[in-house]
Image (cartoon, helix red, strand yellow):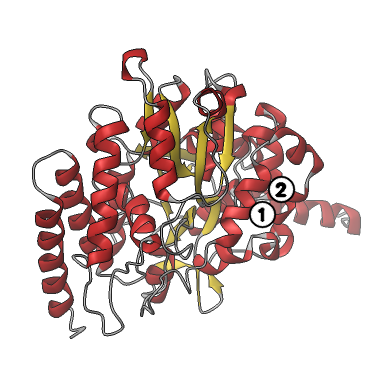
Amino acid sequence: MKSLSKNTIACAVSLATAITTANAFADTQITVATVNNGHMIEMQKLTPDFEKANPGIKVKWVTLEESVLRQNVTQDIANKSGLYDVMTIGMYEAPIWGQRGWLQPIDASGSYDEKDILPSIRSGLSYKGTLYAAPFYGESSMVMYRKDLVKAAGMKISDHDSWDHIRDVAKAINDPKKGIYGICLRGKAGWGDNMALVTTMANSFGGRWFDEKWKPEINSPEWKKAVSFYVDLLGKYGPPGASSNSFNENLALFNEGKCGIWIDATIAASFVTDPKQSKVADKVAFAQTPYEVTKKGSNWLWAWALAVPVATKHEAAAQKFVRWATSKDYIKLVAKNEGWASVPTGTRESTYENPNFQKAAVFASAELKAIKSADPEDSTLKPSPYVGVQFASIPEFQAIGTTTGQMISGALAGAMTVDQALNNAQKAAERQMRQAGYY
């Protein structure tokens, strides 16, 4: 019998290895739960590129409104149900869930280049130096405004204006008869909806969620001043039904030319300057967020990130998807398909260093400045015991923030006074913290 050559044996081994690798993912379907934001929708459109590069892995999408997504993934991971192989979570959940052992550490080996991720974003998604969620896009908040309307009114918007000045500009450009409202702000109830904005306002008025002994301060004079200002501002110069609007609703209003000023996530800049999406793309300018008595905590810090729960039955495939969707190559893929102004931002240093991005994205420097100025370790005028700008990084905050958001949305809708709303939120928070054993 003729013996096999070494080359023949090597080829056979290579073929067997390739078959084994392919079989490992044969008919593997991973379910990805995500939020219905523009960049996430773009990721879904590009999924065939991932599936082509990874034969045998199929991706099923579950796309949800922000508050529903949070409820679903929180319930799924706490119960270890394993419904989702990849979850879209944020800087609030990642360190808490990582500490609890609910998430797999992100595979950041090899060419992934974890150190390229912006330090504040990387830190916020880690626990004890281990990355538990990979950022798909990061954001802070800033002022986006119609420079044509502001100029026509004889006004000016600058970096870090006072909230009083922003109110005066909103008043000057407010023209409901023409369908233009002075200012659009989040009003929809939710700890990640209206409370993202309201918390930064409260911070800048000198407020904080808890004192140094963990007692809630939601009905403090600083919070009352901030929320009263917010309710009055939107009531006089905001669009009708503001208590139902969050990011997507205000984005649609702004792109239709119906908002003079919009203060929200920096990630919106790529949408409002895109002529394919925005009717006012060439009329938009940017500024750093306003404040009242302190700049501390006046702009938030957040990242939507992809995480792999320990309950997944398809960890290897899930990790492959996360690495793909949060890589430098993915950013280049979006740039190739949609242009550099449309890439997900707020995640990697290399994006902001890219000359093509700098040329295409008129908002790049303002966005990066906002992200780098937010400090979760020092976000309140008075000392506070928690980490976080627009949230407190403790498990109890989700319920406290949600209840507070409901109360403030009710005050904005006229269902109760500001004092009633904040007193109700204070009582609920005190009860929650006592039950949790903080005091």
Q: Mark yes or no: residue 350 visible.
A: yes
Task: Give the residue pinned by disc 1.
Answer: 348
Q: Quadrant of the C terminus?
A: bottom left
What residue appears at the point 65 percent right and 50 percent down from the top-left corner? 327
Viewer-closest of 2 and 394: 394
Number of residues whose C-alpha sits closer than 10 Å to that of mark 2, classed few (under 14), some (14–19) or many (20 or more): many
Number of residues whose C-alpha sits closer than 10 Å to that of mark 1, classed few (under 14), some (14–19) or many (20 or more): many
- The answer to which image quadrant residue 356 occupies is top right
User: Is residue 125 found left or right of 313 in the rendered image?
Assistant: right
User: Is residue 236 found left or right of 413 in the rendered image?
Assistant: right
Res 351 label: 2
Viewer-closest of 191 and 74: 191
Residue reaching furthest to the top = 178
Res 68 label: none
The amino acid type found where label 2 is placed reads Thr
Residue 38 position in % (x across, y down):
48, 33
User: In the picture shown, does residue 118 fall above or below 30?
Assistant: below
Q: CA distance from mark 1 to mark 2?
A: 6 Å
What residue appears at the point 39 percent right and 79 percent down from the top-left corner? 383
Contact between marks 1 and 2 (CB within 8 A): the answer is yes
Instruction: Determine the secondary structure under disc 2.
Output: helix
User: In the picture shown, does residue 394 fall above or below 263?
Assistant: below
Viewer-closest of 308 and 341: 341
User: In the picture shown, does residue 334 fall above or below 395?
Assistant: above
User: Is residue 406 found left or right of 161 in the rendered image?
Assistant: left
What residue appears at the point 23 percent right and 46 percent down from the top-left corner? 189
Residue 66 position in % (x across, y down):
33, 44
Q: Mark yes or no: residue 35 visible.
A: no
Q: Quadrant of the N terminus?
A: bottom right
